[in-house]
Image (cartoon, grey):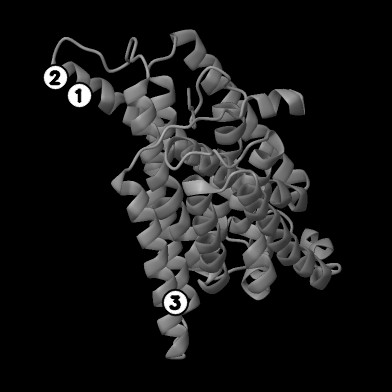
Amino acid sequence: MSLTELTHWLPTTNRRVAHPALTLSRRGLVAIVVAAGVLAGANVQLSVSTQAAIYLFGMVALNLPHGGYEHFTNLRRRAGQFRFRYVGAYLVMVAAFLGLFLVAPLAGLAVAVAIACLKGGLGGLHVLDVTSGTDHLASRWQRWLAVAVRGGVVMLVPLALQPGTFSAYSTYMVSMFDPAAIGPFYEQFGTKRLLAGGGWLSLAGVHVGAGYLRGGGRSWQVDAGETALLGLYFAVVPVVVAVGLYFPLWYSARQVARHEQVDRDSDPGRDLLDGDSTTEVALRAWAMLVAGAIATGTVVAAIWLLAPNPLGTAPLLPGLVAFWSISISLIALPHVAIGSLADRQGGIWYVP
């Protein structure tokens, strides 16, 4: 797929929707930023184990179910043949990505970081399309810049401002497959930090400035305010906690607002949950839930069995954070590539 085709996939819309999930996402991040500031002012630091526990609660208990829900809502009204191709392509990509980690774990880590950024950026852009609007993003390069800024903040800002934690968990993740492979990561690490922080700040400035010059207005005000909030959040909140709560409280909550609006605007068509009785519908929903849970559990179990050292070189809880970060990145690559970019007729972030 060419870059032109990819940018064509990025639609524009002038719709607006107010949704309580948007308020939850903003207030949630503000509350966490305030709490981090209070703790820092009181010279209180969360232990490594506490940070890891918060991450695991946020990413496993809160966010994982939403990932399955995104795929379910994308497939429930699609043709049966499409569903089989979708699942098949998904599993092939998971296997290929796991193979990359096994033979070149540092390259796998780089892809995982890129996927986290793309998920936050592309998903966030389509939320803007449906909620505050994107009138201020007048060209495709601006839309891709918005993706880079809203997604890049998840990894680039912590890399620049919290290098110790970022490098430690990078080491844990790579050491799951080959402890010696992490060496090149630390070459010119200081320069990489400066480039990450300065690069994101520069892109954010261009993004906000260009949006103002291209029209400003309410959509620009919301985008600029949220960009500043995201930058502050990832700058001051410990990165393990920040990532662990960002996806459930920001990404997932805001996708709920997008999906509900799109669902109201779309022709429902044939639904996988259509049935003659409430019992039949409940059984179908239960079967889909169980199938998704078994598939996810199988993928995670395969990673645990194939990784030479599933916990890396870390203690138990940090090791589980590293393991889950790899696991969720393996699941997220086809989530982005198969579930969105390759799905031109729908997709997990569909906006008609």
Query: Is the C-beta separation of discs 1 and 3 under 8 Å?
Result: no
Q: Closer to the camera, 301 or 296?
A: 296
Question: Does residue 112 appear in the picture of this structure?
Answer: no
The image quarter containing residue 323 is bottom right
User: What residue is at 40 percent from the left and 58 percent from the top?
Assistant: 26
Question: Does residue 180 appear in the picture of this structure?
Answer: yes
Residue 129, above or below 77: below
Q: Nearer the viewer, mark 3 or mark 2?
A: 3
Q: Tag 1, which secondary structure?
A: helix
User: What residue is at 37 percent from the left and 68 percent from the top?
Assistant: 31
Residue 156 placement (x, y as % from top left): 67, 60
User: What residue is at 47 percent from the left and 32 percent from the top?
Assistant: 14
The answer for how far apart the CA atoms under marks 2 and 1 are is 6 Å
Residue 237, above or below 130: below
Judging by the rendered image, the residue that carries numbered circle 1 is 282
**Amino acid type indicated by mark 2:** Thr
Q: Nearer the viewer, mark 1 or mark 3?
A: 3
Earlier residue among tags 1 and 3: 3
Q: Tag 2, which secondary structure?
A: helix
The answer for how far apart the CA atoms under marks 1 and 3 are is 42 Å
Quarter of the N terminus within the rendering: top right
Dot 3, how many residues are within 10 Å of its Cα: few (below 14), some (14-19), or many (20+)?
Answer: some
The circle drawn on residue 221 is: none
Judging by the rendered image, the residue that carries numbered circle 3 is 36
Judging by the rendered image, the residue that carries numbered circle 2 is 278
Q: Tag 3, which secondary structure?
A: helix
